[in-house]
Amino acid sequence: MIGFNVAPFTGREFDYIREAIRQEHICGDGIFTKKCNQWIESETGTAKALLTTSCTQATEMAALLLETEPGDEVIMPSYTFVSTANAFVLRGAVPVFVDIRPDTMNLDENLIEPAITERTKAIVPVHYAGVSCEMDQILEIAKKYGLAVVEDAAQGVKASYKGCSLGSMGDYGCFSFHETKNYSMGEGGALLIRDPEKIETAEILREKGTNRSKFFRGQVDKYTWVNYGSSYLPSDLNAAYLWAQLEMADEILEDRMRTWNLYHKLLKPLEDAGAVELPFVPAECRHNAHMYYLKTKDLETRSRLIAYLKEKEIMAVFHYVPLHSSKAGQKFGRFHGEDRYTTKESERLLRLPMYYGLKEEETRYVARMIKEFYEA
Ligand SMILES: *Cc1c(COP(=O)(O)O)cnc(C)c1O
């Protein structure tokens, strides 16, 4: 059986978790959390990175830091994970969904401006499959209308756009270290903060509304309740697990890239024959092999292909029922403009097994079985 995902594991996780225990510091912001924060900062060039308990909570922090209020509108794609919308819905804001580009599955940058109203607060680009949205245009629109940009870079660790790391270009960027992502701590994420002046407020928000971070740095002699906040910091045990992978981030990336490139090469003849469509990566984007997908002709073909692969012991999956067609999406949000591609493309997309350590012969087997399906 070839699974769809296997959580990344390098072997050093046990040593680092043991080390966290030996340090007698297993709560948040221990040595491993600091290492991870610093790694993200030097990797992406962001002013500050703070490890969080999930990407969902990093996005919730961003919504709070922007002082999102009931009735505010937030422009985002409908083809995304629920957390992109939930973070803002929790503050009473209205997700305004715009259509995606069929080539990258990212929100169509040309549809943002027509969706702006006087209630618009922010734009939330989601970098699907670690392939960047058209950030130059998005940042320009944001500047023109005085809007914030929160990048959902859950899938975008170690990917870039014109040399800039995903997550570092908007006001806030959100990473995920969930076990299905390239680098993992089980459940976890990070908030990237571009403006140094926002760091202190973010630290307070993350530490239950206290100035404990300042206290630990010796900048105040006692810590106290200074603002609203919650608990968004993960245990150092989880950070220790993550550190074992960040330390080997390039090897993990190279391994995934090999799989991605092999799929791409082996499936190319099927694309040339018009049977499937393969992922497109614009020239200005460097992706991170987060995902390999193909698109079938239609929903019916996809269902048959999934069943066929399952018979061959291969787990291939699809995702994202477009948010605007979900129960909560209809209740809390609205779609602006026409749904030309969101529904249609989401019904054709199929994700193939992709994880650190997937063997070459397994990748070849998956590609061969897909070919066999189309030959039959
Ligand atoms: C995985 C994912 C999330 C949520 O990440 P968590 O760390 O599980 O909260 C949000 N947005 C996108 C696009 C994702 O892929």
Image (cartoon, grey):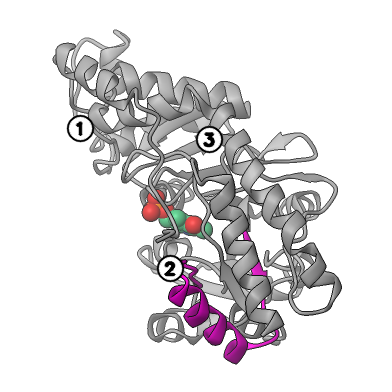
Q: What segment is highlighted magenta in the picture? A: 292-319
Q: Mark 3 vs ligand 1: CB under 8 Å? A: no
Q: Name the residue nearer the viewer: 180 or 284.
A: 180
Query: Which residue lies at the image location 31% right of the left edge and 37% below the top edge?
Result: 206
- Which mark lies nearer to you, 1 or 2? 2
Q: Is mark 1 within 8 Å of ligand 1?
A: no
Horizontal and vertical percent for residue 169? 67, 40
**Residue under label 3:** 193
- Secondary element at tag 3: strand
Q: Earlier in the sequence, mark 3 or mark 1?
A: 3
Alpha-carbon neighbours of circle 1 within 10 Å: few (<14), some, or many (≥20)?
Answer: few
Question: Toward which corner of the image does residue 44 lie, by quadrant?
Answer: top right
- Residue type at mark 3 is Ile
| Residue 315 falls inside the magenta stretch | yes
Q: Residue 244: name its quadrant.
A: top left
Per the rendering, the mark at residue 314 is none
- Inspect this view and state whether residue 58 appears: yes
Residue underneath mark 2 = 313
Please state which amino acid type lies under the numbered disc 2. Glu
Where residue 5 appears, as percent x and y from the top left, is: 43, 54
Crowding around mark 3 (Cα neighbors within 10 Å: few <14, some 14 to 19, many 20+) is many
> In the shown orientation, is residue 271 left or right of residue 31?
right
Figure check: 71 above or below 334:
above
Q: Which is more toward the observer, 27 or 177? A: 177
Residue 315: percent from the left, percent from the top? 45, 67
Q: Real-space Cα distance between discs 3 and 1?
A: 22 Å
Mark 1 lies on residue: 225
Q: Tag 3 or tag 2, which sits nearer the N-term? A: 3
Q: Mark 2 or mark 1, which is nearer the start of the sequence?
A: 1
